[in-house]
Amino acid sequence: MDTREGVRTLTLDRPERRNALDAELRDALHEALDEAARDSSVMAVVITGADGAFCAGGDLGSFEELHDARVYRHVSHRLTELMDALERLEKPTLAAIDGVATGAGLTLALCCDWRLASPGARLLFREGRLGLVPTHGGVGRLVKLVGLARAKEALLSGDDLDALAALRLGLVHAIEDGDLLAAAHERALRMARRAPLSYGAAKRLLHLAADSDLRSTIAAESLVQTGLLATDDHREGLAAARERREPAFTGR
């Protein structure tokens, strides 16, 4: 874990297993996200993996115990909680993807607001080769992010996606030829220029809009805007615009 200029970088570090999520890493990441959410000095979070891999999903070494349906549901619930916590975090979240992202690791990346890939990144939907399907929101988030037609191409075509294919399908936002973490850091700072309360509200509204009808979303927008109009950050934003300077937001 490293924090610089308000950007906290969380590195998945099980290189001998291509950073696959076992119970210890899952819980450590969940705790780190909780800490980042509560720490007002953290403006954004970048998730990456160690030694040329992002995350190889769930640890295959634990799959035998998951044949007990009760154990599977327990483990699945814990992983789903992690994905939900990342998606709900009301700060910019970015995935810096180098090497393999597959299974739960790919779902983890899809939960982030922004995804940067190295030229060597590979996004793999290989659950079908294990007789399984993406879980923890892997299918639902995929469809919401790129639409049904592209989701079918990604999930059912049988092709592994390199960085260019992932970019074409909309699974990543950009390919970074240079320093991947530096590019993610720069993007995080740019995203964090928004007023913190505004960013968090916009993020929640976007997720609501993906699940709701237009009229419900419009009503929610109005209620949220009413609250934001009373904030110090709104007044600071207006003053900065009038004075032609950068705003100094405080999150209040």
Image (spheres, rainbow, N blue to C red):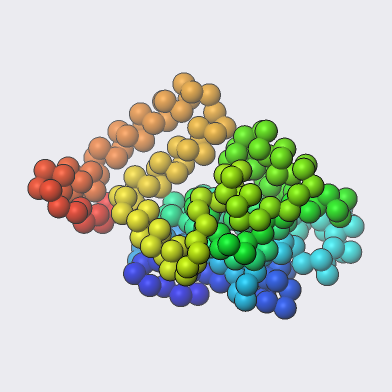
Tell me which corner region of the image, top left, top right, bottom left or bottom right, holds residue 230: top left
Q: Residue at x 40, y 47 (%)?
A: 200
Q: How many marks?
A: 0
**Observer-nearest residue: 60 or 72?**
60
**Observer-nearest residue: 248 or 34?**
248
- Residue 207 relative to residue 51: left or right: left
Tell me which corner region of the image, top left, top right, bottom left or bottom right, holds residue 17: bottom right
- Residue 236 relative to residue 97: left or right: left
Q: Residue at x 46, y 21 (%)?
A: 215
**Observer-nearest residue: 15 or 224?**
15
- Residue 190 is situated, as x and y percent measured from the top left of the image, at 35, 56
Tell me which corner region of the image, top left, top right, bottom left or bottom right, holds residue 11: bottom right
Residue 133 appearing in the image = no
- Residue 8 is situated, as x and y percent measured from the top left of the image, at 44, 68
Q: Is residue 167 above or below residue 67?
A: above
Q: Residue at x 67, y 76 (%)?
A: 14
Q: Is residue 147 above or below residue 36?
A: above
- Residue 219 is situated, as x and y percent measured from the top left of the image, at 41, 25
Q: Is residue 222 above or below residue 177?
A: above
- Residue 167 relative to residue 14: left or right: left
Residue found at the very far bottom of the displayed protein: 16
Q: Residue at x 16, y 44 (%)?
A: 241
Residue found at the very far top of the displayed protein: 215
- Residue 154 is situated, as x and y percent measured from the top left of the image, at 70, 44
Residue 190 appearing in the image = yes
